[in-house]
Amino acid sequence: DQKCLKALFFIALTLRSIGKSSLALEFYAQALKYDPFFVDCHFNSGNIYLEEFSQLDQAKSCYVKALATYQNTEEAPLVNIGRIFSLL
């Protein structure tokens, strides 16, 4: 259901904003169970893995999934994949 999906997404956003990024990742994962093509969940999860946990492989995996599911041209996941490679 779309309302539940959006609620999970916004709860995750809120959790990250108050410093509970691990819990935010759990909510993004729950949202992706409803809709595995929810690009913003993949993208935001990648941002958490990259920016807060320095888990480059996890971040890259999320960004690649975001790119694979996005229907239009989107630069943000590509930019973040570039950020990962600059850290290697």
Image (spheres, rainbow, N blue to C red):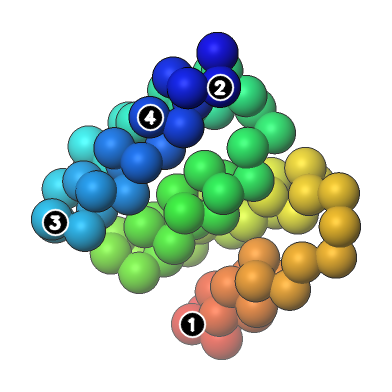
The x, y position of residue 72, in whole percent, is: 86, 57
Mark nearest the camera among 3 and 4 is 4
Mark nearest the camera among 2 and 1 is 2
Residue 18 image label: none
**CA gap, disc 2 to disc 1?**
37 Å
Front position in the image: 7 or 50: 7
**CA gap, disc 1 to disc 4?**
34 Å
Residue 2 image label: 2
Q: What crowding class fits label 1: few (fewer than 14 Cα within 10 Å), some (14-19), or many (20 or more)?
A: few
Name the residue type under label 3: Gly
The x, y position of residue 66, in whole percent, is: 68, 50
Residue 7 image label: 4
Name the residue type under label 1: Leu
**CA gap, disc 3 to disc 4?**
18 Å
Name the residue type under label 2: Gln
Name the residue type under label 4: Ala
Question: Where is the N terminus found, in terms of image quarters?
Answer: top right
**Mark 1 / mark 4, whichever is N-terminal:** 4
The x, y position of residue 35, in whole percent, is: 62, 24
Element on which disc 3 rests: loop
